[in-house]
Image: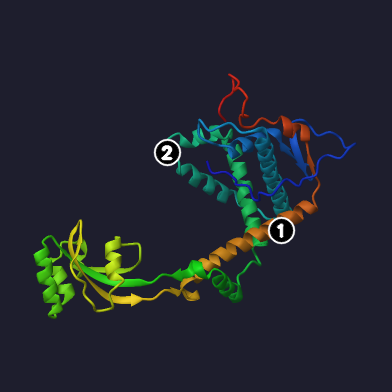
Amino acid sequence: MRRWALLLAPGLVLACARRGAPELDPSVVATVNQEAIPVVEFERELALAYEVPEGTPAIAPDQLLALKQTVLQGLVDRQLLLQDAHAKGIAVAPSSVLATVSRLKAEYLDAGFQEALALGRLSEADFERKTAARLTVEKLVDEVVYERVAVTEDELQGYLESHAAEFQEPEQVHAAQLVVKDVEDARRLREELRGGAKFAAVARAHSLSADGRLGGDLGWFPRGVMPPEFDKVAFSLEPGQISDVVTSEYGFHIFKVLERRPAHRKELAQVRREVERRLLRDKKEKAQAAYVHSLRDHAAIRINEGALAKASGPRLAGASRPAEETRP
C-alpha cells in the first residue's frame, strides 16, 4: 500500500490546549485551524508507521510517545499544506486522481489491493480521498515551494571541491589477457608475442577466456576489481609491456597493459547531473521545511492530550496482547 510518508520529522512543536479553552471532542486528536484530525485517522497512521514483521520486540512506552508525536506532527503538517493549497485555489482534476488510483491498483495481483486496504483500515473511498489530498499537496509543493529553488554554478563547483575525495577517480589500467591450460603453451605464446605477434590476434586464436573473442580486452579497471595476483602484475607494467606467465586456478595467463590512467578528480562536466540532483534535493527539503514552519507559525493548532495518550498504537513492551486484538 502506497501511503503518505511524513513530510518532516522534527520534534513535536505543537501548542497544547490552553487552560480554560473548551475541551476537544474525545474522538478528535487535534484541530488545525478548527479542522479536526480524527482519532481513528491518527490510529491508522500510527499503525502504519510501526508496520514491522511478526516477532519484532514490542515498542517501549517512551518510544511509543515519540512515535505518536512524530505521526501527529506529520498529520498536522499535511493538513496545513492541504489547507494552504485550497486557499490558493490549487486542485487536482478528478480524472488525475482516478488515473493514479487505477495505476496503484494495477501494481497488485488478484485480491492484493483489497488486502492492502484492509491492512491499512481503509475503504476505497478513503483511499481515493487520501490520494487526492496527496496529489494536491504535491502540486502545491511543486508549484509554490519549489518554484524558486535552483542550483548555481558556484554551488556546483563548491560542492565538488568540498567533496573532493568522493569524486576522486583511482588509478586505472586498460589491459588485455590470454588464458591457456598448459604452461608450455603459455610460454610459447609469450615468445610469439615478444617476437612481434599481435596480442589481440593471438588471444582470439588461443585464449580460453570469454574475453578471448574480444582480443582478450579486459577494459579499464582500478585496483581491487581483479584477483590480487592479476592486480599485482597489471599495475606493475607500463603501456605496451607484456607480463610473464601468471598462474591462477583458471589456468596460465599472459597480460598486456594497453593504457594507464593516473588517479584524478572528476571534472564537473562528468558529475554535474549527480551533484545538481543532490543539491536540489537538499535545497528542496529545506525550502519545504521552512514553508511548513511558516504555516505552523500562523496556524491555530490544538492538541487533545487526553486523546493522544489514549490512542491505541503498537503493542507495548511488557504488555500482554488482548485476545480480541486483530492486526490492522
* Three-letter code, disc 2: Leu
Where does residue 191 sit, x and y in percent of width and height? 12, 75
- Residue at 86% from the left image edge and 40% from the top image edge: 18
* Three-letter code, disc 1: Ala
Q: Are the residues flagged by discs 1 and 2 in contact, CB closer than 8 Å?
A: no
Residue 166 against residue 193 in the figure, above or below: above
Q: Secondary structure at mark 2?
A: loop
Where does residue 283 sit, x and y in percent of width and height? 63, 63
Give residue 281's mark.
Answer: none
Which image quarter is the C terminus in? top right
- Residue at 77% from the left image edge and 30% from the top image edge: 26
- Residue at 15% from the left image edge and 61% from the top image edge: 208
Q: CA distance from mark 1 to mark 2?
A: 40 Å
Q: Quadrant of residue 307?
A: top right
User: On the image, numbered disc 2 is attached to which residue?
Assistant: 109
Q: Quadrant of residue 40?
A: top right
Where does residue 276 sit, x and y in percent of width and height? 55, 68
**Image position of 210 (left or right of 68):** left
**Image position of 182 (left or right of 282):** left
User: On the image, numbered disc 1 is attached to which residue?
Assistant: 290
- Residue at 68% from the left image edge and 48% from the top image edge: 78
Residue with the most extreme top position: 323
Residue in front for this viewpoint, 80 or 204: 204
Precedes in sequence: disc 1 or disc 2:
2
How packed is label 1: few (under 14 Cα within 10 Å), some, or many (20 or more)?
few
Residue 104 against residue 148 in the figure, above or below: above
How packed is label 2: few (under 14 Cα within 10 Å), some, or many (20 or more)?
few
Residue with the most extreme right position: 20
